[in-house]
Image (cartoon, grey):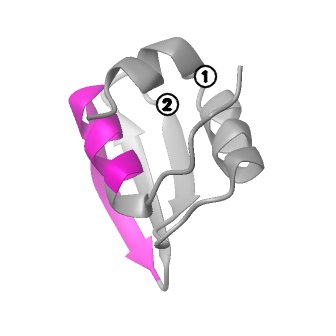
Amino acid sequence: MKLPLLSGREIYAALERLGFADIHRKGSHVKMEHADGRRIVFPYHAEVDRHTLRGALRDADINEEQFLEQIR
């Protein structure tokens, strides 16, 4: 499945809907954590590379289909 090109803002909003909360920001990167302890770090850029996003989702054990359902 091919992920769409998304902005950091769109990724951030989708992760919030999945239960992640912002815990740290430094430069252009955001670190978010879920109540169950999973963490994700991603660039908060105007456009985030698909491969970067896929790797971040895999590292945080987030199902791509569930993530895409949260994109609005």
Q: Position of residue 59 (x, y in %)?
A: 69, 34
Q: Answer left or right for 50 relative to 47.
A: right
Residue 19 located within the stretch drawn in magenta: yes
The N terminus sits in image quarter: top right
Task: For residue 8, say whether it is visible.
Answer: yes
Query: Please, what is the three-letter code of the amino acid marked with disc 2?
Result: Arg
- Report the mark closest to the observer, 2 or 1: 1
Q: Residue at x 56, y 50 (%)?
A: 5
* Residue labelled with disc 1: 61
Label 2 to label 1, Cα distance in Å?
7 Å
Few, some or many C-alpha atoms within 10 Å of disc 2 (few <14, some 14-19, many ≥20)?
few
Residue 32 located within the stretch drawn in magenta: no
Few, some or many C-alpha atoms within 10 Å of disc 1 (few <14, some 14-19, many ≥20)?
few
Helix, strand, or loop for circle 2? loop
Near-viewer residue (39 or 58): 58
Q: Residue at x 68, y 57 (%)?
A: 49
Q: Position of residue 22 (x, y in %)?
A: 29, 54
50 is higher (above) or lower (below) than 62: below
Number of on-image labels: 2
Query: Please, what is the three-letter code of the amino acid marked with disc 1?
Result: Asp
Decide which of tag 2 and tag 1 comes sooner along the chain.
Answer: 2
Task: For residue 63, say whether it is visible.
Answer: no
Residues rendered magenta in the picture: 10-26
11 is higher (above) or lower (below) than 67: below
Label ID, residue 38? 2
Q: Position of residue 14 (x, y in %)?
A: 32, 37
Helix, strand, or loop for circle 1? loop
Location of residue 62 (image quadrant): top right
Q: Residue at x 44, y 24 (%)?
A: 67
